[in-house]
Amino acid sequence: MGPMFRRLLGINWKTTMAGIAVLAAVVGKLIAALKAKDFATVFTSGQELIPDITAVLVAVGLFNAKDNDTTGAGDAAKKVSMLLLVGTLCMLGSAAPARAQTKSNELSIGAVLVRQDPHFSRADFKYNQTTDQVGADVSLTHYFGESAFGVTADVGASVKGRSATDASLVTVAIGPTVKARNRKLEPFARVLIGGARLAARNQQLKFDKTNLGFALLAGGGVDWRVSNRFAVRVIQADFLGTRILGSTVKNARVGAGLVFSF
């Protein structure tokens, strides 16, 4: 027999085939992730599997040490390689998906600026002063699984003080939200319907009135995703319409804040 054939016969084929099987499983996992276009899993899995693949190659090489090694190093190498191979198989079998599970709920807390332009001329309630109000907004959104669709409940309050007429506006609304999720910048849009409470007080004119009505919010914004649990609401802008005492008032509301996912 030629030298090449004798070299092939000297290889430990059982060990070599075991190593090839492990490598095939690794490659199969990466191909499946590529077909699913799950690029985050492909990237992180590739990084995590580098030491595992290296360990398999080392184990196969050590297993193929010559049996006629008289120094005893061959037996020691085989024992070490067995431990490496078993450990590698355990790591590959227990590897968890690298992609973090998308959270279904988001709580946003932010500051808002409301441009209010009321036109009430009733005998019992006259308020026609355009004001810029500062306040806060809190919303809770629940998404359906990992889809872009969700339901948002929103509570906003703004006040205007240190003037002849003090005014405050409180809205409570709920409605659908659509958001591009699982990316660095996450734009969203929403339409919410609910109730509004407008209060105005003027000490000089001696009136203090509080009235209830309907509210409509339509707008959206952009969130900057920092981590799986935290994002920064870079901008949020809404048309805020109210219907109180038979008058429709068109307001504008802009703000920014923080978003917590859970």
Image (tube, helix red, strand yellow):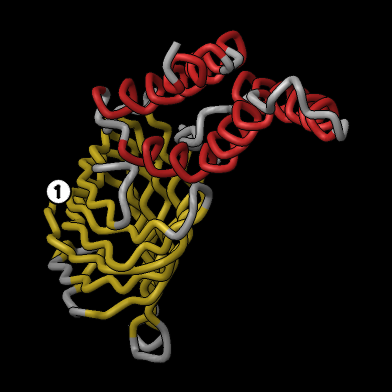
Where residue 236 appears, as percent x and y from the top left, is 27, 62
- Residue 89 lies left or right of residue 215; in this view the side is right
- Residue 73 lies left or right of residue 235; in this view the side is right
At 53% from the left edge and 49% from the top edge, which residue is drawn? 229
Answer yes or no: is residue 245 visible.
Answer: no
In terms of image quadrants, where is residue 194?
top left
Is disc 1 placed on a helix, strand or loop?
A: loop
Total marks shown come to: 1
Q: Amino acid at mark 1?
A: Gly
Where residue 100 appears, as percent x and y from the top left, is 50, 37
- Residue 193 lies left or right of residue 107; in this view the side is left
Q: Is residue 43 above or below residue 72?
A: below
Quick one: 174 or 56, which is closer to the camera?
A: 56
Where residue 180 appears, as percent x and y from the top left, is 24, 42
Q: Which residue is mark 1?
A: 246
- Residue 250 lies left or right of residue 80; in this view the side is left
**Quarter of the image that includes the C terminus:** top right
Q: Is residue 33 above or below residue 193?
A: above
In terms of image quadrants, where is residue 55?
top right
**Quarter of the image that includes the N terminus:** top left
